[in-house]
Amino acid sequence: MMWPPPCFERPRMVWEDQMGGVTTAREQHGMTRAEFGPVTVCFGDRNGKYPDGNQVIVRGTDSVAVFDTPISANAIGPDFTNADLCILGHVHEDHMAGLHLLKGKPVYAHEADVAAARSWDALADVFGYEGAEERAASRARFEQDFHYVETPDAIAYKDGATWDLGGVTVRAVHMPGHTPGHCALLVEPYGLAFIGDIDLSTFGPYYGDANSSMHDFRETLRKVRDLPAKVWVTFHHKGVYTDRQRFLDDLSTYEARFDERDVRLLEMLRAAPQTLEQLARGRLLYPAHFNEPWVDGVEARSIAMHLDELMGKGRVARDADGRYRLA
């Protein structure tokens, strides 16, 4: 059997014949899907670009599991709603947009993220929302845009947890950084890895939550290369890789964003010593014109991580007045 198919980087909006038991791409009910043995990938809007995502459905002989639940899950129909369980690779609002359709069914989240799945207050803490007014407005927006619901009965799992679906096993591999509980989900023995928000986008790694870790994300990107996979599925942007070299090349480009941001930050400090607040307003991650209410917090948290690393390397110093400068 030809596994994986020789090329499948961008879904094509046509029906295609079986290729050695693998349907490479097809359109059904207006949604492009790819099938890899027992796994179906349903592609969200613009290949799962935020705020949407790509839905993974895994069918065993005994049960059906879905990985995360993007906005597009709401358009899939019975293939999604008849699933027996949901495994969250991590907990963010855009990964919870179909949970309202799975009420009464078990939902699993890594033990480091499960509190954020169970309650709005814990999720709001993750995003660094402060004050009752900001929290209420954000929850209302999530309810409108992502069908957000709390999942108080969410079940915690640990690194290495497995789910036997009948002839198909799902295994969680802890890959933190984006969130403390971010995991890759391996479909065995089929060699498919759902790598979630290691999305290989041009934006680069995101570690702007109150509990994110740039250090852990760096380590994760080293580990993801060693996953025993032949197919890699991202929740956003890229969709599906079956060419290992292309996957590795894009992973290297994605990883390089860490160092590119260091260079940019050093250039900002070369112009003049600045406080963390000034650096956040100058924008390291987002364009200067991008002014969502949460951006300053994300910028400040992300920049602080870079500054800590650069100070540890002796390249940046902090003065008594709180300004950072080149060492």
Image (spheres, rainbow, N blue to C red):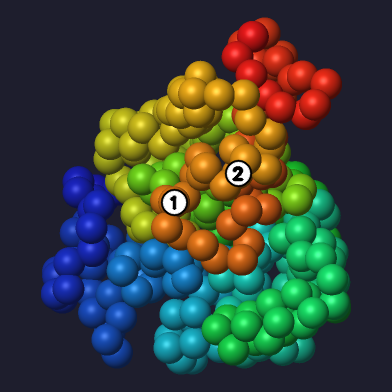
Find residue 290 and report its horizontal and vertical position in percent.
Answer: 46, 59
The residue tagged with tag 1: helix, strand or loop?
Answer: loop
Say if 62 sits above or below 181 in the image.
Answer: below
- Packing grade of label 2 (10 A; few <14, some 14-19, many >=20) is many
Q: Amino acid at mark 1?
A: Ala
Lateral position of residue 163 relative to residue 32, left or right = right
The residue tagged with tag 2: helix, strand or loop?
Answer: helix
Q: Quadrant of the C terminus?
A: top right
Q: Is residue 223 visible?
A: no
> Distance between the Cα atoms at labels 2 and 1?
10 Å
Please name the residue that numbered disc 1 is placed on: 288
- Packing grade of label 1 (10 A; few <14, some 14-19, many >=20) is few
Residue 320 or residue 159, whichever sits in front: 320
Find residue 15 and report its horizontal and vertical position in percent.
Answer: 15, 75
Residue 255 or residue 310, whichever sits in front: 310
Say if 50 sits above or below 120 in the image.
Answer: above
Lateral position of residue 40 relative to residue 93, left or right = left
Please name the residue that numbered disc 2 is placed on: 280
Find residue 66 and report its horizontal and vertical position in percent.
Answer: 56, 71
Q: Residue at x 80, y 26 (%)?
A: 321
Q: Looking at the image, is mark 2 or mark 1 earlier in the sequence?
A: 2
Q: Quadrant of residue 95?
A: bottom right
Q: Residue at x 55, y 24 (%)?
A: 272
Marking on residue 256 = none
Q: Is residue 314 visible?
A: yes
Find residue 210 and report its horizontal and vertical position in percent.
Answer: 75, 51
Count the marks: how many?
2
Q: Amino acid at mark 2?
A: Ala
Residue 215 or residue 30, whichever sits in front: 215
Q: Residue at x 50, y 28 (%)?
A: 268
